[in-house]
Amino acid sequence: MLLGVDVGGTFTDAVLVDGIRTTTAKAATTPADQSAGVLAAIDAVLAAAGVTQADVTAFAHGMTVATNALLEGKGARTAFLATEGFVDIVELGRQARADLYRLQAAHPAPLVPPERRIAVPERTGAHGEVLRELEDPAAVAEAVAALGVEAVAVCLLHADRFPAHERALGAALRARLPDAHVSLSHEVVGTFREFERAATTEVDAALSPLLAAYLERLAAAASERELPEPQIMQSSGGLTGVATAAAHAAFTVLSGPAGGAAAAALVARATGEPNLLCFDMGGTSCDVCVVQDGSVRETTGREVGGRPLALGMVDVHTVGAGGGSIGWRDAGGALRVGPRSAGARPGPAAYGHGGTEPTVTDAHVVLGHLEGDLAGGVGLDARAARAAVRTLADALGLALEETARGILRVADAEMVRALRVMTVERGLDPRDFALLAFGGAGPLHAAALAEELGIRRIVVPRAGSVLSALGLAAAERRRDEAQTVLRPGDELTGEELAGLAGDADAVAWEVRYRGQAHELTLRDGARTPEALRAGLTTAHEERYGYAEPDAAWELVTVRRTWRTAGAEVFREAGEPDRTVRGPARLPGPEFTALVPAGWAGGHDAAGTLRLEREA
């Protein structure tokens, strides 16, 4: 049996898969120590399935420990070591404003303050020539020890390609500070661009002790309960072992959303919908991603909480629009929703845990969209929901139901903006996609979002409210490497490219014309210089509308991926029974869906709800 557990802002979801049988359960998330909520969810799903821990053969986990710490600017007491003259590189960053028209807006402060930044007397040139020897790494390690730190980030100039000095310094630090975590930039990132590499290494060092402590507690608890050691979801969408995740927390910053993205790719294959625009609306946030030609779109780096991470990861965009997002009146008298959330405790007023502020969930209760008990055994208090929304209605001078509808429209607008960021702003037409809605609140909003974007098909999997956890259970194991090479195209040989590809299961080549500042990515297939050049011509034409087939070009970075396939947990789908025509409300054990007028559809053989816009 496969066990998947995903930690969200409000609920922790658990899924147990035995062949084609799937059992689900929810427990309240415990922000102070997420492992408590994880264990509660595991107990609930085992009880629901009528099995014991001994029946579980694999345990996959996605969490928000690293994400939350990064967003809150928290981390272990860390020192940052860089080549002399470069110690302030993270603080200096790039000449890009945090907000173009707000001159006072600033980027987040570095995780390491100036007094814990140490200049290392060494220098390696851009071509590997040693301009200044690293003469006494032990003395540098002694200076770090005097700072009393729990972690050390090391980012020496050009260490992505020439890491000898960084390795020597790492060995001295690990010998002098055996209990401190040491992150070396060439081990974390492996690619050029000093600022992004340094910022990523700093994040990795600061968060790894926190994540390691959490994973140690969870692994110990799993062992006590005779559960398998957890496999951890990485931001890239693949699973890795506890030791790797604990050593490199930066790899797991998008651990939770990546589970949903992995599940979305599985849904695409099982439903015969290769192009899906996916949104996961949970209790605290909404995560949006794109599945194109059956694969989740990936990116080689992005910002999380205003901090750059130069790592391969699934391309997910997150906004603060979830079932627990709070409605409020701004200084100008306008209705706003989120990003502040009621969270797991007290949660929406309708949950009866003491919440008094109006949320998206409360608005649904007021309008009659949600009734009875929710998944996870949460009973709804309609009176408390109406009281919370009425407070906001009075402040706005509106009627109760008008205010509830307004809350939903504002939340929908925020999610539509996120969906457009991932499509229209990337040159994709959302009308070419089906909308995959999941998360506890997703099916309630799917049709409204589809109408706004001109999408004509909606897919909601049977386990839609816990789809991220199901994606964890079925996810592949994955290891990624990136290596900057900066080789002129006319000097490359097929033999050299074959050596760079090695025995990897998938290879991505980042190429550009000489003199350009940014690269285009060619995935697989191209294993000769001629194929790479042709691929650059095609990709440049598609991206920019022109190409220069005879211009000098270069191979910048090679990204390699090794994969071990996960389990198949989705059955083949049949044709849907066209039994529902809107307007209708479809309550179910996993989710409630709203079907407005003009939409119709039904459930297929796998239990997936499929809706289509009628002509």
Image (cartoon, rainbow, N blue to C red):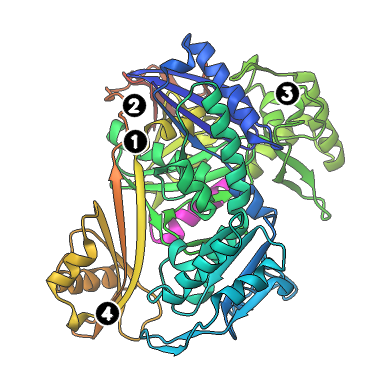
Q: Is residue 549 visible?
A: no
- In the rendered image, which residue does mark 1 sit on? 266
| Snapshot quadrant of residue 493 | bottom left
Disc 4 or 3, which lies upstream in sequence? 3
Identify the residue position indicated by label 4 in the image.
487
State yes or no: discs 4 and 1 in contact (Cβ < 8 Å).
Answer: no
Q: Rounded to the nearest whole Å, what is the CA distance between mark 3 and mark 1?
A: 32 Å
* Residue type, mark 4 in image: Arg
User: x, y (%) of residue 418?
Assistant: 54, 51
Amino acid at dot 1: Leu
- Whether residue 47 is visible here, answered yes or no, is yes
| Secondary element at tag 3 | helix
- Spatial CA span between label 2 and label 3: 32 Å
Compared with 443, 427 (above or below) is below
> Quick one: label 2 or label 3, which is nearer the N terminus?
3
x then y, percent, for residue 497: 19, 69
Which residues are drawn in magenta?
A: 413-428
Q: Residue at x 75, y 18 (%)?
A: 381
Going from N to C along the chain, the mark reached first, 3 or 1, is 1
- Contact flag, marks 1 and 2 (Cβ < 8 Å): yes
Query: Residue under circle 3?
Result: 351
Residues packed near mark 2 inside 10 Å, few (<14), some (14 to 19) or many (20 plus) = many
Mark 4–mark 2 distance (CA, rounded to whole Å): 43 Å
